[in-house]
């Protein structure tokens, strides 16, 4: 038997995105993927349409269609002028109607492509490389990923094999809250050649879907589920090339699981071919699950082909007609996407790659950042200075308090702390003018967050005045404090005079003690350096 000389990985991806509309895809029943209904009791978000009861007729959710088109445009897809609904027939206990309403022959979005951003060693977007290329005026080589289609359908319910809390039960519980949830299925070409590429795409897609407002994107809640289709091209020592059967890994809801499943199949598929000789043919596709504890996949079932589902036109729903005007209206509403926005922050504001990456992780935080810059500019700050101060406030004072309030069950964002972008901008101005110290600026930020509703419309300057945070500008007193510190620390002062400027930090600290916190450290430093001939 010839030996395997080379193994090439091929991966295509199916991504199921639960849309966060208020209601379900074909009924006004509340949607469990909307934040208001995350913790609804089992089987409380149902109605006759969800259960497929006789006489119940579906009505399309327009908002779900528009959000899907927005994602499709972000994926550079063509938008079908007319798409239709099909019934995908199969029996499974989580599907009350015994069929799923989907799109088969005429999907809403199709024929798109994206270019993967450069990757870091950790498998994340490499903003540092983007920054370097931007400074050099060059272009980075990108991997193109084709998008076959992005079609709308309804989600199925959930089957629970243990009671909430992990208690053992006999049989299986069915919860139909998720049934009927609007679900956008995105299908790529098999253009991925490494697991890192797949993970970067998944992260990027999650950011995009959340940024356009399509989904909450909480992976632990199943808002996005990834299903890689994996096989290998084996080049043999005798010159032949064979392809292993495709394996589809179902319902992965973490980037770690996506990477682990692909790497496992890359290791195992060549060995399977050696053992059974099976090659890729129609009907040879299998479905496997992922065992996170054992770090391996396991067989679930042979994969059905399209004909097995007996697709046919749904008689209860009209086609979806998208005019050119409607598509352009949705296109005009597309926000600046995370990667483009981060690149702009690097180029125009001189932020570090780490800062830019942190700011574009959450849409609401990003919008707060942009608004704080605009308010800062309106208050007289230079735009680049406003951008730096806003980043410092949000990523330091804001992130610290958001982390303190967050729990494993619920993440709190800076945008949800209760402080407004206008108030952040006013704090920035107070700090830039030397009217409050860095420590007081952080404390003032926290006070406005703690005040809750009371903080709405509150003036940071007034709060700082009541709390005694404003720095008293007394030049005579400042000169006196600096002279005392220089006299008491002659050796350190001499070091500064000789050019060891880092030594001035000790003098600043001593002067701030004498000032009792009523002086600005920046002004103290400038005064000391001037007195020591380094100003």
Image: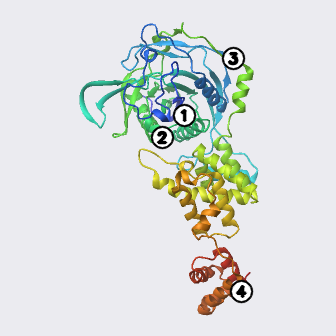
Residue 255, label in figure: 2
Instruction: Report, in whole angstroms, how far the alpha carbon at label 3 lies from the one at label 4.
Output: 74 Å
**CB within 8 Å, label 3 to label 2:** no
Mark 3 and mark 4 in contact? Answer it, CB < 8 Å: no
Q: Are marks 4 and 1 in contact (CB under 8 Å)?
A: no
In the image, what residue occupies the spot 55% across and 53% down? 454
Residue at image location 45% in from the left, 50% down from the top: 406
Identify the secondary structure beneath mark 4.
helix
Residue nearer the viewer, 321 or 467 = 467
Quarter of the figure with residue 66: top right
The dot on residue 531 is 4
* CB within 8 Å, label 1 to label 3: no
Q: Disc 3 and disc 2: Cα gap in Å?
A: 35 Å
Mark 2 element type: helix
Q: Which of label 1 and label 3 is nearer to you?
A: 1
Residues at marks 1 and 3, CA–CA distance in whole angstroms: 24 Å
Residue 205 appears in the picture as rendered? yes
Q: Earlier in the sequence, mark 3 or mark 2?
A: 3
Compare residues 465 and 17 and report the one nearer the observer: 465
Residue 361 x/y as whole percent: 57, 46
Of the two numbered discs 3 and 4 in the rendering, the one whose residue sits closer to the viewer: 4
Q: Quadrant of residue 444?
A: bottom right
| Quadrant placement of the N terminus | top left
Residue 5 visible in the displayed image: no
């Amino acid at each position: 038997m010839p030996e395997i000389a080379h193994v090439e990985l091929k991966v295509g991806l199916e991504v199921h995105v639960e849309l966060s509309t208020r209601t379900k895809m074909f009924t006004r029943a509340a949607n469990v993927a909307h934040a208001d209904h995350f913790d609804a009791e089992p089987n409380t978000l149902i109605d006759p349409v969800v259960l497929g009861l006789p006489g119940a007729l579906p009505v399309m959710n327009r908002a779900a269609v528009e959000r899907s088109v927005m994602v499709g445009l972000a994926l550079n897809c063509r938008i079908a002028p007319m798409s239709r609904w099909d019934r995908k027939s199969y029996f499974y206990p989580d599907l009350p109607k015994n069929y799923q309403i989907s799109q088969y022959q005429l999907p809403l979005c199709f024929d798109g492509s994206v270019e993967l951003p450069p990757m870091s060693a950790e498998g994340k977007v490499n903003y540092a490389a983007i920054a370097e290329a931007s400074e050099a005026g060059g272009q980075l080589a990108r991997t193109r990923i084709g998008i076959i289609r992005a079609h709308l359908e309804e989600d199925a319910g959930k089957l629970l094999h243990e009671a909430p809390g992990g208690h053992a039960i006999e049989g299986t519980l069915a919860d139909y809250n998720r049934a009927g949830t609007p679900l956008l299925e995105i299908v790529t070409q098999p253009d991925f050649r490494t697991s890192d590429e797949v993970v970067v795409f998944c992260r990027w897609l999650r950011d995009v879907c959340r940024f356009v407002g399509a989904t909450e994107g909480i992976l632990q809640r199943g808002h996005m589920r990834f299903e890689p289709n994996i096989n290998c091209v084996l080049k043999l020592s005798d010159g032949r090339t064979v392809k292993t059967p495709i394996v589809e890994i179902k319902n992965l809801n973490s980037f770690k699981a996506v990477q682990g499943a692909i790497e496992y199949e890359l290791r195992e598929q060549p060995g399977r071919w050696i053992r059974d000789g099976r090659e890729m043919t129609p009907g040879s596709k299998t479905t496997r699950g992922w065992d996170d504890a054992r770090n391996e996949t396991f067989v679930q079932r042979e994969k059905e082909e399209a004909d097995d589902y007996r697709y046919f036109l749904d008689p209860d729903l009209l086609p979806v007609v998208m005019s050119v005007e409607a598509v352009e209206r949705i296109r005009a509403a597309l926000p600046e996407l995370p990667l483009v926005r981060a690149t702009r922050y690097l180029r125009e504001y001189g932020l570090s790659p780490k800062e830019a990456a942190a700011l574009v992780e959450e849409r609401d935080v990003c919008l707060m950042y942009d608004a704080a810059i605009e308010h800062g500019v309106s208050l007289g700050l230079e735009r680049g200075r406003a951008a730096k101060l806003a980043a410092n406030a949000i990523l330091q004072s804001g992130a610290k308090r958001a982390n303190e309030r967050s729990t494993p069950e619920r993440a709190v964002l800076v945008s949800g702390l209760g402080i407004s972008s206008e108030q952040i901008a006013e704090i920035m101005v107070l700090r830039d003018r030397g009217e409050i110290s860095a420590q007081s600026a952080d404390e003032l930020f926290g006070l406005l967050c703690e005040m809750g509703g009371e903080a709405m419309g509150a003036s940071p300057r007034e709060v700082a005045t009541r709390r005694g945070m404003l720095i008293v500008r007394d030049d005579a007193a400042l000169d006196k404090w600096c002279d005392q510190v220089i006299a008491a620390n002659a050796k350190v002062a001499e070091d500064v005079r000789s050019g060891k400027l880092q030594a001035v930090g000790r003098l600043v600290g001593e002067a701030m003690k004498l000032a009792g916190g009523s002086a600005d450290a920046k002004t103290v430093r400038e005064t000391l350096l001037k007195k020591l001939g380094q100003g």
